[in-house]
C-alpha cells in the first residue's frame, strides 16, 4: 500500500471544483419528502436566487445530471429533427455539443475560429447574412471555453446576430462561467442559458439547469425531438416546475448554502475575487514564459478567462509529465489538456471556493514541477503573483 500524502490535497481543476465545507455539511442530512413544506421552503428561494444570479425573469428547469444533461435537455426542448444550428467553434466543448446535436438529427454549421483567439463576431454576422432562407434556428456559444480559457463576449455575439437582422435564438453554455464571470441573461438578449452545479456553484457533480426566456419557450412549443425525462412541458405540470421523477433533495440543501455564501460575499465581490486570483495566475504564467517557457494559451488579452487558465507547454515538453509530478510530489491536481490539446496544455482552475494561499500553493507546485521536469522557463512566477496579490 502506498502512503497517502500528508496535508491537504490541492484541487486546481476547472470542474468539478472545491466544495466548501459548509456545503458538504449542509447536504449531510436525512431524506425528506420533496413535497414537504420544509423542503419547498428551501427549493423555492434557491430557484429565485438562481434567477437573480442569471439576471432573468424566465423559467429555470433543473435536472439531476451533469452539464451534458443540460446540453441535451436544451437541444431536445428547442428543436426538431433536420433543423440547423450555427455553432461558434471554440474548442473541446463546442465540438462535444456539436457532436451531440448531430445525434439528435440536427444539422450543425460551424463558424470557424482561431481557438487561441475565439470566434470573430464579424464572421458570425457574415454566416447569418449568407443564410438568406433563414434556416438557422439558433446560434450556440460556449461562453467560457473550459478547454482553452478563452471567453466569448456574449453582448458582442448578440450584436452580431442583430447586425445580420437574423431571427436565430442565442444559446449560451455558461457551465464554467456562471457566478464566475459577469452574465446578464435578459439584458444581454440570451434566449437560453445552460448551466451546471459543479463549477462556479461549488456543488458536487449532479445538478444542471437551463434558463429559458420567452422566445425559447415559444420555440419549445414547436420542438419535436423525442424527449421525456428532460421535457419542459412535463416539468411544468409538476409541483416544482422542474424534475420528472424524484427531486434530488440533498442537492438543494447544498445549493441553498452555496447561494447563501455567494449572496453573503456579494456577486460583485465574487466576480472581483475571481478576476484578482485569475490575474495572479496569468502573471505567473507570463513570468514563466521567458526563456521559451510555457505561455498563456489564450492569445487575446481581452478574452482571457477569470475561471480557468490553459497553459501551453513549450514544443517537445509533455503537459502530462508535469501534471504527474505536481500530483505525485506535491498532491496538487491540475486540469488535463482536452481533445487535441492533450499533452500540449495543462489547466489551472481558479473558480469557485478559492483564496490567495490556495492559488499561491498551486502556482508554487507548478513552478517546482517545471524545474523537476526540466521544462525551460523563467523563474519568478510565484513572486509575480504575490506582487499582484499584495499590491
Ligand atoms: C464542464 C463543461 C461541460 C460539460 O459538463 P459536465 O458536467 O462535465 O457534463 C460543458 N460545457 C462547458 C463549457 C463545461 O465547462
Image: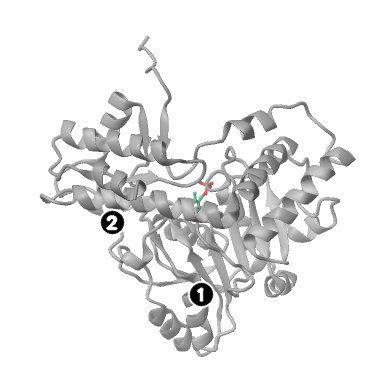
Q: Nearer the viewer, residue 184 or 229?
A: 184
Q: Residue furthest left?
A: 291
Whether the residue under disc 2 has CB within 8 Å of ligand 1: no
Q: Is residue 138 above or below residue 1?
A: below
Q: Mark 2 sits on what residue? A: 297
**Residue 229's spot in the image, x, y percent?**
72, 50
Q: Point out residue 118 in the picture as x, y percentages from the top left corner.
A: 36, 67
Q: Residue furthest front?
A: 391
Residue 379 visible in this rendered orientation of the protein = yes
Between residue 193 and residue 269, name the one nearer to us: 269
Q: Is residue 387 above or below residue 304?
A: above
What residue appears at the point 25 percent right and 47 percent down from the top-left corner? 384
Disc 1 residue crowd, few under 14, some 14–19, many 20+, Cα 10 Å: some
16 and 305: which one is in front?
Answer: 305
Give x and y (percent) for residue 259: 66, 47
**Looking at the rendering, in which quadrant would you find the N terminus?**
top left
- Left/right placement of residue 252 relative to residue 83 reads right
Q: Is residue 390 left or right of residue 286?
A: right
Query: Crowding at label 2, few (<14), some or many (≥20) Cα neighbours within 10 Å?
Result: many
Q: Is residue 143 left or right of residue 187?
A: left
Where is 73 relative to 380, above or below? below
Q: Position of residue 128 (x, y in %)?
A: 48, 83
Q: Which residue is mark 1?
A: 155
Mark 1: secondary structure? helix
- Residues under labels 2 and 1: Cα distance? 23 Å
Answer yes or no: disc 1 within 8 Å of ligand 1: no
Residue 390 numbered mark, or none: none
Find residue 222 and report its image quarter.
Answer: bottom right
Residue 226 makes an appearance in the image = no
Query: In the image as oriented, which residue stretches furthest toward the top?
Result: 1
Q: Residue at x 36, y 12 (%)?
A: 3
Residue in the picture at 23% in, 33% down? 369
Amino acid at each position: 500500500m502506498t502512503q497517502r500524502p500528508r496535508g491537504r490535497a490541492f484541487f486546481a481543476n476547472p470542474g468539478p471544483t472545491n466544495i466548501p465545507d459548509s456545503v458538504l455539511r449542509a447536504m449531510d442530512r436525512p431524506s425528506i419528502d420533496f413535497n414537504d413544506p420544509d423542503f419547498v421552503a428551501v427549493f423555492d428561494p434557491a430557484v429565485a436566487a438562481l434567477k437573480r444570479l442569471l439576471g432573468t425573469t424566465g423559467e429555470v428547469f433543473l435536472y439531476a445530471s451533469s452539464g451534458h444533461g443540460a446540453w441535451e435537455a436544451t437541444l431536445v426542448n428547442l428543436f426538431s429533427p433536420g433543423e440547423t444550428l450555427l455553432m461558434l467553434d471554440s474548442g473541446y466543448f463546442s465540438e462535444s455539443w456539436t457532436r451531440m446535436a448531430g445525434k439528435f438529427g440536427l444539422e450543425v454549421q460551424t463558424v470557424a475560429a482561431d481557438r487561441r483567439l475565439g470566434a470573430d463576431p464579424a464572421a458570425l454576422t457574415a454566416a447569418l447574412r449568407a443564410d438568406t432562407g433563414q434556416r438557422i434556428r439558433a446560434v450556440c456559444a460556449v461562453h467560457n471555453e473550459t478547454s482553452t480559457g478563452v471567453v466569448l463576449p456574449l453582448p458582442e455575439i448578440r450584436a452580431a446576430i442583430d447586425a445580420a437582422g437574423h431571427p436565430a435564438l442565442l444559446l449560451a453554455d455558461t457551465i464554467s462561467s456562471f457566478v464566475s464571470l459577469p452574465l446578464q441573461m435578459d439584458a444581454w438578449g440570451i434566449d437560453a442559458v445552460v448551466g451546471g452545479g459543479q463549477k462556479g456553484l461549488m456543488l458536487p457533480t449532479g445538478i444542471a439547469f437551463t434558463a429559458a426566456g420567452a422566445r425559447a419557450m415559444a420555440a419549445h412549443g414547436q420542438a419535436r425531438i423525442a424527449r421525456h425525462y428532460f421535457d419542459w412541458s412535463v416539468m411544468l405540470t409538476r409541483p416544482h416546475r422542474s424534475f420528472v421523477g424524484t427531486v434530488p433533495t440533498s442537492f438543494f440543501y447544498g445549493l441553498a448554502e452555496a447561494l447563501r455564501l455567494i449572496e453573503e460575499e456579494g456577486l460583485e465581490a465574487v466576480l472581483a475575487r475571481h478576476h484578482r486570483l485569475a490575474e495572479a495566475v496569468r502573471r505567473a504564467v507570463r513570468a514563466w514564459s521567458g526563456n521559451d517557457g510555457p505561455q498563456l494559451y489564450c492569445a487575446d488579452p481581452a478574452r482571457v478567462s477569470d475561471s480557468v487558465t490553459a497553459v501551453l507547454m513549450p514544443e517537445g515538453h509533455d503537459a502530462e509529465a508535469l501534471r504527474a509530478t505536481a500530483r505525485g510530489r506535491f498532491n496538487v491536481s491540475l486540469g488535463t489538456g482536452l481533445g487535441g490539446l492533450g499533452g500540449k496544455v495543462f489547466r489551472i482552475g481558479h473558480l469557485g471556493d478559492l483564496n490567495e494561499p490556495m492559488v499561491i500553493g498551486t502556482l508554487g507546485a507548478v513552478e517546482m514541477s517545471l524545474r523537476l521536469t526540466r521544462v525551460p522557463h523563467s523563474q519568478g512566477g510565484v513572486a509575480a503573483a504575490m506582487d499582484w496579490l499584495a499590491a
